[in-house]
Image (cartoon, rainbow, N blue to C red):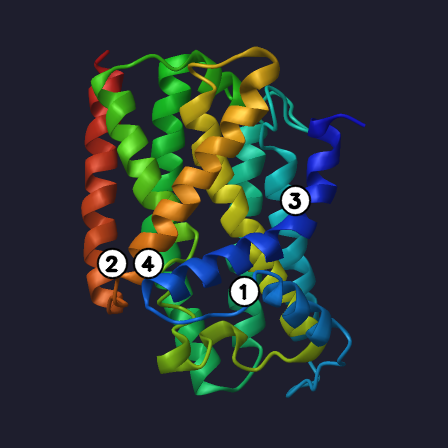
Amino acid sequence: MNAQDAAPIIVPLMVPFIDGVARKVRAVIQKRVGPSIVQSWYDLLSFLRIECNSPVDSLTFRLAPYIAFASAIGMLLFLPFGEKAPFGFEGDVIAFIYVFTMFSAAVVMGALSVPSSYTSAGAGREVTMSIVFKPLFAVVIGIFAMKTGALTIEGMASALKPSISVLGAYLLLIYLTYVEAGFVPYDIAEAETELLGGPLAEYSGRLFAIMLWAFQIKRFAMIWLLASMLVLPFVSGSTVLLFQCGAFALLFLGMVVYEAMSARYRIDQAVRNGTMALTLGIFFLLVGWMGW
């Protein structure tokens, strides 16, 4: 089994350790001892052994974590590990956008199926963020597709050449990745100290573990997408995967460090920043359409 085929199996097992590294780095920056890097795995295993104490008899509430998890795995299937994606096909970027959006839809559906002010507030914030940042992602991908004529992630990344619109799209993708990865100050929907986890507030036991695991996989997928878009235009052959891992590590640690020094935004601040980014994205799309 090569790296491309094994990635959807290996990555879900790795992401709790990666989350543990993030927790350790944040602790060091904040001058705390912090948990072990395997603590996130211990937490998941502990929750997986416990039945969920469901607050409502709702099929939507019970299915939402599984849909979110499946969506996160689906994102992995279309990402290049090396030069090829496990399930890559012509137009897979459209499928990636679909499962990327489905993840947020599952989180919102699960939250709204419970009569709780915390989950309702979290769902409202998730919808508001999606209205701003999902179109931004589509615009960025549209710029890459327009400049390369490709509709596969690896095809776009491998064919990108420097231009004003492409450089602008890269900057917006870095920003968007940070937001969609759920780092502070953009973890507004969950906001543990404010909304007790928002959409996750009423989940417990096994369902909470699956939802938490799905968020960790989605974070990995978004940063790996960015790493691939940065590496594939310049590297080919057997060393691609090594460079992707290196780029992922640098991006992930950089985002964790920034998060440790940041305070959470209000929803209006996030929307204002997102609207400005979307406006810039449309501008760069027009610039790219004009050939620059």
Q: Looking at the image, which is closer to me, 248 or 126?
A: 248
Task: Indicate the amino acid at tag 1.
Answer: Val
Residue 185 is at least partly visible in this image: no
- Placement of 177 over or under 127, stated as above or below: above
Q: Which mark is residue 271?
A: 2
Marks 1 and 2, the one that precedes in the sequence: 1
Q: Nearer the viewer, mark 2 or mark 4?
A: 4
Q: Measure how far apart labels 4 and 1 are at the Cα level.
A: 23 Å
Marks 1 and 3, the one that precedes in the sequence: 3
Task: Indicate the amino acid at tag 4.
Answer: Glu
Marks 4 and 1, the one that precedes in the sequence: 1
Q: Is there a contact, CB below 8 Å, between mark 2 and mark 4? A: no
Marks 2 and 4, the one that precedes in the sequence: 4
Q: Which mark is residue 11?
A: 3
User: What is the crowding at mark 2: few (fewer than 14 residues within 10 Å), some, or many (at least 20)?
Assistant: some
User: What is the crowding at mark 4: few (fewer than 14 residues within 10 Å), some, or many (at least 20)?
Assistant: some
- What residue is shown at x 24% (from left), y 22% (from top)? 165
Task: Indicate the amino acid at tag 2.
Answer: Val
- Placement of 252 over or under 264, stated as above or below: above
- What residue is shown at x 52% (from left), y 17% (from top)? 155
Q: Measure how far apart labels 1 and 3 are at the Cα level.
A: 21 Å
Q: Measure how far apart labels 4 and 3 are at the Cα level.
A: 23 Å
Q: What residue did someone put label 1 on?
A: 107
Secondary structure of the residue carrying numbered label 3: helix
Residue 69 is at least partly visible in this image: yes
Secondary structure of the residue carrying numbered label 1: helix
Q: Measure how far apart labels 3 and 2 are at the Cα level.
A: 32 Å
Marks 4 and 3, the one that precedes in the sequence: 3
Q: Judge from the rendering whether residue 276 lies leftward or rightward of residue 2; answer left or right.
A: left
User: What is the crowding at mark 3: few (fewer than 14 residues within 10 Å), some, or many (at least 20)?
Assistant: some
Asked where in the image residue 82 lies, by quadrant, the reply is: top right
